[in-house]
Image (cartoon, grey):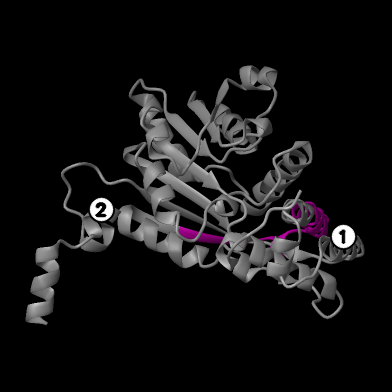
């Protein structure tokens, strides 16, 4: 059954999350996590490990949250790394879709807790306590252009003063194909996927949010271009799976969404998907660029400069606005 849209804006906003949440999506997320780990080389950077060790030395158990955790692969990697470092941390994974969580037996074995959470609902954050490290990875598929500030502020609200915020995000606008002239189907599909996701300007948005709200901010850049061919082929498989999820979700809503993408029917979109998957099988690689932002939450009582103030503090009062208008 298709959904009828009254306006083009409704067609653009047909889904809050445009990727899948079933068993196939879980398999893709596991693969994606392995590729990312290989690309970045280390799960927790040395500065984060040092921060957690200092907390442990004071007799406390560090608390780490992973928002948008999916199957929890990042948390399992963190658990393994911290065991080697002698740090026994409390690990919590949060996601809107519990169907993606790992089996309860694995949760118990690794001593990791998983909870349902909507990143856009502030009241859900009020009861989960405070964390020493907050981590997010690849959540732009669940955040619209107008939702970045509130999602960021919600996560920041449960980070302890002096805690570290880590956000790793795929940069769609910087993705590249190894041979665009040969793999025209992938190029066409990529442009459609961009329309489906509508997540532009990730880099400037997150850079601004980190710079305005946190101290000691940094941005690291990674890419699958630097990986051996085996991993690049795995990335191609990952993108093929993700593309199928995007197309299937769009197809569920019928011709209204498909026409918004510039095609006539769901059948035409599915035909393009098959051609795209063949291209990936035959050697196409869509390189994945990723940025990792990090910053430290200021401690209370410190006078942050204006560019490092919270989003609420950045809003000028009516008196400030009038003074600026009069004396400019």
Coordinates of residue 203 in the picture (x, y in percent): 50, 65
| Residue neighbourhood size for the residue with mark 2, other residues' Cα within 10 Å, grouped as few (<14), some (14–19), many (≥20) | few
Residue at image point 80% right, 70% down: 264
| Residue neighbourhood size for the residue with mark 1, other residues' Cα within 10 Å, grouped as few (<14), some (14–19), many (≥20) | many
Q: Which residue position holds label 2? A: 312
Q: In the displayed structure, would residue 282 be above or below residue 294?
A: below
Looking at the image, residue 225 sits to the left or right of residue 316; the answer is right
Coordinates of residue 312 in the picture (x, y in percent): 25, 53
The span picked out in magenta is: 219-242
- Please tell me which residue lies in front, 110 or 238: 238
Can see residue 138? Answer: no
Instruction: State the separation of the CA atoms marked 1 and 2.
Output: 46 Å
Q: Which residue position holds label 1? A: 277
Looking at the image, residue 235 sits to the left or right of residue 146; the answer is right
Q: Quadrant of residue 7?
A: bottom right
Q: In the displayed structure, would residue 309 be above or below residue 178?
A: above
Q: Quadrant of residue 123?
A: top left
**Which mark is first along the chain, 2 or 1?**
1
- Please tell me which residue lies in front, 186 or 6: 6
User: For numbered disc 2, what is the local secondary structure?
Assistant: helix
Q: Is residue 131 magenta?
A: no
Residue at image point 48% right, 26% down: 89
Give the main secondary structure, helix, strand or loop, of the magenta stretch: helix
């Amino acid at each position: 059954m298709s959904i009828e849209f009254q306006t083009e804006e409704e067609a653009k906003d047909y889904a809050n999350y445009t990727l899948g949440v079933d068993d196939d999506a879980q398999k893709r997320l596991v693969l994606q996590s392995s590729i990312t780990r290989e690309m970045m080389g280390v799960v927790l950077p040395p500065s984060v490990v040092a921060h957690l060790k200092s907390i442990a030395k004071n007799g406390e158990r560090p608390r780490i949250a992973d928002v948008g955790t999916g199957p929890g692969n990042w948390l399992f990697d963190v658990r393994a790394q911290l065991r080697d470092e002698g740090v026994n941390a409390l690990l919590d994974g949060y996601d809107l879709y519990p169907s993606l969580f790992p089996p309860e037996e694995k949760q118990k074995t690794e001593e990791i807790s998983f909870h349902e959470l909507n990143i856009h609902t502030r009241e859900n954050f009020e009861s989960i306590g405070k964390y020493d490290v907050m981590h997010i990875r690849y959540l732009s598929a669940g955040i619209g252009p107008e939702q970045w500030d509130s999602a960021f502020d919600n996560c920041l609200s449960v980070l302890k003063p002096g805690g570290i915020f880590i956000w790793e995000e795929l940069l769609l606008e910087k993705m590249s194909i190894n041979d665009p002239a040969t793999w025209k189907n992938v190029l066409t599909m990529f442009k459609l996927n961009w329309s489906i996701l509508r997540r532009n300007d990730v880099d400037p948005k997150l850079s601004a949010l980190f710079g305005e709200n946190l101290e000691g901010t940094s941005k690291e850049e990674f890419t699958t271009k630097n990986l051996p061919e085996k991993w690049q082929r795995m990335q191609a498989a990952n993108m093929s799976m993700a593309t199928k999820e995007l197309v299937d979700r769009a197809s569920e809503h019928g011709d209204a969404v498909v026409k918004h993408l510039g095609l006539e029917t769901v059948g035409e979109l599915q035909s393009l998907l098959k051609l795209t998957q063949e291209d990936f099988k035959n050697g196409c690689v869509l390189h994945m660029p990723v940025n990792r932002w990090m910053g430290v939450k200021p401690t209370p009582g410190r006078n942050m400069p204006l560019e490092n103030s919270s989003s609420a503090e950045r809003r000028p009062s009516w008196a400030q606005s009038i003074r600026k208008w009069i004396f400019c």
